Image: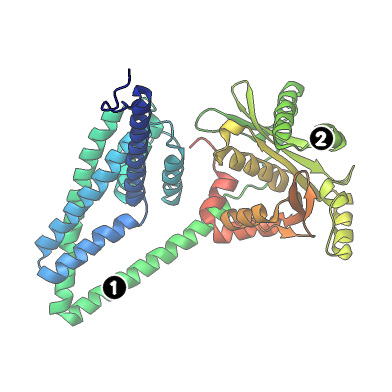
Amino acid sequence: MHNESIPNLPNVNSIDEVSNRSNRLLRTIVRAGEIALVMTEVLPTNELIRLGIFGLTEAVTRSPIAAAVSLGVSTFVVEESGGLAAAELFDTEKSHKIVESINKKIQKLHVPLNKNLSRASKIGWTLMGGTVIGMALEQRESNERTKENNRIYSTITSAWLAGASAVVGIMAAEGINNSISNPIDGGIVAGTLVLGGSLTKATANVYKKKKIKSTEPKNIGHEMIRDVDYEGRIFQYTTDKQLLSKAAILEQEIWDKEGYGNLDVYADYIKNARTITAFDGEKCIGLARLFESKTKLPPFITEMPYYSQKEKKSLLKLCKKGFVEELGTIAVDESYRNGLIFENLARLAYRDAYYGRGMKHWGVIMEPKRIQRMNKHYGFTFKQLGPEINYQGGLCAAHIMDLKEANDNVREKFPDIYEWFVNQPLNA
């Protein structure tokens, strides 16, 4: 019997599905908000917000106390918001990008790379970097910290940072008012501060350059091509046949997934290649292969077109002298592709080539767009040698880099990267 007055009831499974989608959307929105709060605290946006509020309050009230209170309150709000959001994110599996951003700021602050810092040191770095940076330093020393530990840390740290900012705010506001009331005295004070700041910065830059120059390794030797990162993963120049076999298996698996074909076609190159491996326990998670050029000319010379035959002949002469090699492979296990493994492999390969063996040039076959990104972000100086062709499933071209030119360019334009790339250990 049909009763058309009774409406069709919705399916229970449909209701659950809609509810689940709504919950996922809400979680995504909340997570995006947390990330935004953390990035606001880590990036210069933090200072812009706080100093903007401080300046506006001082301009309107001409009261050092009011300006200092506004700076203290805004500092607490920004720091506490970022700290609580970071506490939530550190407790999730999808926090890699945030952690990478925080680590970049830690590097820019020149925080020492040794894992255990003194309490006084951590307070100093937190004062410079903020609550999230301080929390990251604590987290770096103990992965067993809970979300509640980090929340308490956030509140306490944000409170004392707010108090410190308020004190600085009173001093700054008094200085501003003094400059307005007594322009001559204020001008003398301001000029002295500017001159002192300029001299301090200039002295720091000179010291920094001298320090970098003085610590530049002369010849690190093959036995030094080994390092361990903060998670205990081992990166090293490898000759052990068992380890090389595991690396070859990983490389072939990646080739199969990318549709590059069989590595047998590169057997002659691989036979004489230098291999840097990355292992997480017994598992090979990455490798870099450097093809020598004296015994057998590498693929970037023999298999790719060139704009200039004259330039090709010049490179051939350098190859026969053993001054050129090809960065043939940097392969990373799919589950470890966060950028760090690639960078660690690249820098050990670079140390081995330039400082360990006196290599002069690196050739590579790669997509020009990827080369441009590497040059931009790391200060490399790869130059394209010929037109793009379809090579192993992509539009690639031959490129060359003068290692001394690259070394000098990175040292001058990216001193922080240079210090890490050339001198520092991985275990930070």
Position of the N terminus by quadrant:
top left
Label located before the other in sequence (2 or 1): 1
Q: Is residue 11 left or right of residue 350?
A: left
Please tell me whether residue 24 is drawn above or below residue 218 in the rendered image.
Answer: above
Please tell me whether residue 355 is drawn above or below residue 172 in the rendered image.
Answer: above
The location of residue 106, given as percent across then percent down, is 42, 46
Q: Which mark is residue 192?
A: 1
The location of residue 207, given as percent across then percent down, is 48, 58
Q: How is the image coloured?
A: rainbow
The location of residue 228, given as percent across then percent down, is 56, 31
Quadrant housing residue 138: top left
Inspect the image, locate mark 1, and give the three-letter code of the amino acid beneath it: Thr
Inspect the image, locate mark 2, and give the three-letter code of the amino acid beneath it: Ile
Which residue is found at the position 72% from the left and 45% from the top?
353
Give the residue pinned by disc 2: 270
| Tag 2 secondary structure | helix
